Structure formats: structure tokens, C-alpha cells
Image (cartoon, helix red, strand yellow):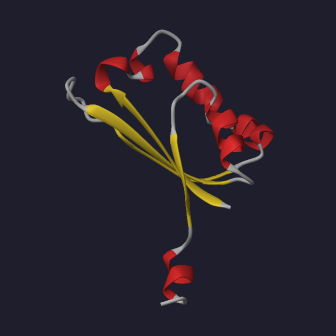
Amino acid sequence: MLFIAEHTHPASECPMNMPGGKDMIKDLFSEEHIKDAGIELNGAYMSCPNDEGAIHKGYFIIEAPDQETIKNFFGPMEVKIREVKPFSEIAKTL
């Protein structure tokens, strides 16, 4: 199944600026962790401007058997998960 996972946090709480945050991100998105989680990460996109007042958003395109697998992959990070289908499949039903 194909999903979009969205993560949001204030710029002031960005893990990239926290002690150990960069290592946490590297470990989370390592090939080993992705494989062990049983997901396929097809794309990852971030909006991380330098504006301290901004909200950072991450969008992740993931193939997984279910939403619980994705939640387990992200661990304590809060994500909104939505199942999606390629528009080409939807267009066939129109």
C-alpha cells in the first residue's frame, strides 16, 4: 500500500538544531533502519527555511503493509498518515 506521511514541527524545535538531532535523523533514515522497518521510502521532502518563526514540514512517500508499520518506523515522531493511490489509477475509474 502507498502512503503519505506528514511531520510538522516549529523551526525552534527542529531536531537538526538539537544536541544529537543530526545523528538521530541519520539513524532514522539509514538504509538499515528502513529495511528493518519493512518499508520502502520512495521520496522525502522537507520545507526547512532559515526563518526562525516558520513551521517545518516533512512529506514522506512510503510503501508499507499498513499505517502501524509506518508509525513504528517513525517511533516517537508524530506523523499524519494517509493512504494514497497514483492518480493514473483513479483516472481509470472516471
Q: Give the residue drawn at x 55%, y 27%.
A: 25
Q: Give the residue drawn at x 36%, y 18%.
A: 13
- In the picture, measured across the screen, residue 20 lies left or right of residue 71, that is left
Q: Residue furthest front?
A: 94
Compared with 15, 91 (above or below) is: below
Image spot of residue 80 (x, y percent):
49, 42
Compared with 84, 24 (above or below) is: above
- In the picture, measured across the screen, residue 79 lies left or right of residue 51, that is right
- In the picture, measured across the screen, residue 28 lies left or right of residue 11, that is right
Circle count? 0
Determine the image quadrant of residue 36: top right
Compared with 10, 2 (above or below) is: below
Image spot of residue 87 (x, y percent):
49, 77
Image spot of residue 53 (x, y percent):
19, 25
Q: Give the residue drawn at x 59%, y 28%.
A: 26
- In the picture, measured across the screen, residue 91 lies left or right of residue 75, that is left
- In the picture, the quarter occupied by the N terminus is bottom right
Q: Residue furthest top?
A: 19
Determine the image quadrant of residue 46: top left
